Amino acid sequence: MPNDFLPTIESEIDQEERGVQPWDIDAIVGALRDARRRSPRVISAGNRRAPIPSPELLQQVVTRLYASLFPRHAGAVDHSEEGLAFFVGSTLNEALHLLSEQVRREQGFIDPARLGPSLNTRPAEVIVAEFTQKLPGIYELLESDIRAAYDGDPSARSTEEVLLSFPGVKAIIYHRIAHALHALGAPVVARIIAELAHSQTGIDIHPGAKIGGNFFIDHGTGVVIGETVIIGERVRIYQAVTLGAKRFSVDEHGALVKGEPRHPIVEDDVVIYAGATILGRITIGRGSSIGGNVWLTHSVAPQSTIVQAQARSETFEQGAGI
């Protein structure tokens, strides 16, 4: 059978299917256009034709930033000092050009009429230039996180294994990058980067959250860390932990008040075990231990141990309960 035979058959099938399609594509396109024109969100946009940030391109940005921070783990072939310097320079330059364009896109669809006089955007190149100055500090924080993961998990055989395969480490790498951009004035780009990590690891960290060094999320699936959370040094949390808001304030019109502190403060050297839910602007004192599945809405003093009020001891026989 000749190589061009199948494409010919597929082309004829496509043409036949297009000829008998039961829908009117032009009418559908027109109806969707009219629906968009009626949308208050679209109507209020300052420039509907401006391109918007691309999650796909921001994934490329993060991939290149990761390679710039950890070149030996991300594709560098020549591991000499000169070879690594060339690889990092080339890769980082690509990442920063892509990032500048994405920040510029974010600024392009901001509606000044909705944000009012508080709008104060700086050129994308300025934001990215300031971001580059933070990269050495980001690297140092990540090294502390990697070490915390290795020291905190008896199954870890090396820091290389931790860096290459632990979802909690991946999530914090994305967060350190996103948090810096959020603080510099690119909150939408930062939020997209956070969501990329969420979709890949199951760990949802808002880019506004402030997280100290030596941070370790073990296992990680289902972890939620809210926008105004503050976490100190050497904190360890496990899967399905929520650091969330207890309630949301509203203004005189019933709209949610955005940005006010509403999430927990976790001081240094705290351990929070799997399934714990900690809500509201409360403080978990230094050195405390919060047990699994605890529901906590009040502050606790330093060195506290909080466990469920009652635990049941059950015996399963012959596989019952499994």
Image: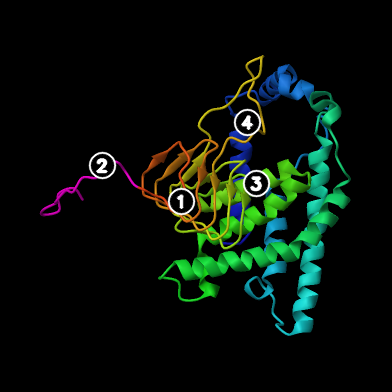
Q: Please tell me which residue is depicted at 77% across the width and 67% down the height of the picture.
A: 91
Q: Nearer the viewer, mark 4 or mark 2?
A: 2
Q: Amino acid at mark 4?
A: Gly
Q: Does residue 33 appear anywhere in the picture?
A: no
What residue sits right under mark 3 in the picture?
207
Instruction: State which region is magenta.
Output: 307-322
In the displayed orientation, state which residue is furthest to the top: 253
Q: Mark 4 or mark 3: name the one nearer the start of the chain.
A: 4
The image shows residue 135 at horizontal and vertical percentages of 75, 62
What residue sits right under mark 1 in the picture?
221
Quadrant in the picture for residue 114: top right
What residue sits right under mark 4 in the picture?
19
The colour scheme used here is rainbow
Q: Secondary structure at mark 4?
A: helix
Q: Mark 4 or mark 2: name the one nearer the start of the chain.
A: 4
Q: Amino acid at mark 3?
A: Pro
Q: Does residue 91 appear anywhere in the picture?
A: yes
Judging depth in this view, the residue of 225 and 249 nearest the camera is 249
Q: Secondary structure at mark 1?
A: loop
In the displayed orientation, state which residue is furthest to the bottom: 80
What residue sits right under mark 2 in the picture?
310
Q: Secondary structure at mark 2?
A: loop
Relative to residue 126, is residue 274 drawn left or right? left
Let me know if residue 317 is in the magenta part: yes
